[in-house]
Image (spheres, grey):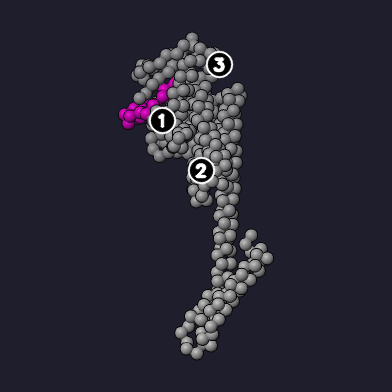
Amino acid sequence: MIRTLAITRSHEVVTGIPLEKLQPEDYAWIWVDFNAPTPQESALLTTYFHFHPLAVEDCLHVLQRPKLDYYEDLQFFVLHALDPETLRVEEVDLFLGQNLIVSFHSSVLQEVDEAWAEIIQHAHDRKIWSRGPVSCAYNVMDKLVDKYFPSVFSIEDELAELENRGSTESIEDLMNQVFDLRGRLLKLRRTVVPMRDLMYRIVNSQHVQSNNEHKVYFGDIYDHLLKLTDMIEADREMTADLRDSYISLNSNRMNSIMKTLTVITTVFMPLTLIAGIYGMNFTRMPELAWPWGYPAVLLLMFVLGGGMVMWFLKRGWFK
């Protein structure tokens, strides 16, 4: 679907204008949104707008890294939208011209719909009208970045719960949850860091159609991305600390178990030796004919085993 939004020079909004009837010179500026377009509609990027083939290729093919390219009288942005539930990344492409902005995304996105509705609602505001397509680009970017926060907040809540459950769940379950959180944080980092770098380039670029007032707004988005980056790095460090703590705890438990088993084995080794000696079927063993031989051997085994246990307790091997 292709939808159009035009701002007249009298601050009025006109929507739903067919492309073939859209005359840019009749309006202050225009926004054309390719919202989950068909292949035939996607072809209009080349046949109608005559955008650069490389930019069109970036729109139609593999998911690209967030970036900014310059093509004569327009700028081309590749942005990333993020699903807070699945962390699935969706590409959003923007063509920004002097009085034209074209957005392209292969599926319906709530962020773009919200930016679209906001432009319509506040189009009478002279600040919105005077900023032109830059205001649309800012709104879209701002909505996209705002959707990153719920995912990070959700992971932070899970980390807090994980710390509280450390004494009630098995180490294996806790480790699986920690590695799952680290994997999700890595996905977020792969989205947030390139977007942060892109926004830094926008704020410091001399080619983007923006004055100092506009760059303040883009700088605000950049600050949000810096905050997100710091939160993600802090969460990654926390998961690393939890992982190391669980590994150390598991090692300590294993060492305690092995120490206990070693002590038990050590106690029974001489007892097994004595039992093995008198379990041999030799006929000339004097103790076998002695009436007190059996009680004496049991007493020896008891004294020997008890003595070793007392010695181990004294040395603190059971602690």
Q: Amino acid at mark 2?
A: Leu
Residue at the image position 55 percent from the left and 16 percent from the top: 127
Whole-Å distance between the Cαs marked 2 and 1?
29 Å
Looking at the image, is mark 2 or mark 1 nearer the viewer? Answer: 2
Q: Could you say whether the residue bearing mark 2 is in a helix, strand or loop? A: helix
Q: Earlier in the sequence, mark 3 or mark 2?
A: 3
Residue 74 against residue 26 in the figure, above or below: below
Q: Earlier in the sequence, mark 2 or mark 1?
A: 1
Q: Quadrant of the C terminus?
A: bottom right
Residue hosting label 2: 181
Q: Residue furthest bottom?
A: 284
Q: Amino acid at mark 3?
A: Lys
Q: Nearer the viewer, residue 154 or 56?
A: 154
Residue hosting label 1: 105
Q: Nearer the viewer, residue 234 or 107?
A: 234
User: Is residue 294 visible in the rendered structure shown here?
Assistant: yes
Q: Amino acid at mark 1?
A: His
Q: Position of residue 99 (x, y in %)?
A: 48, 20
In screen coordinates, is 64 left or right of 308?
A: left
Which range of residues does the magenta coloring cover? 31-48
Residue at the image position 59 percent from the left and 50 percent from the top: 245
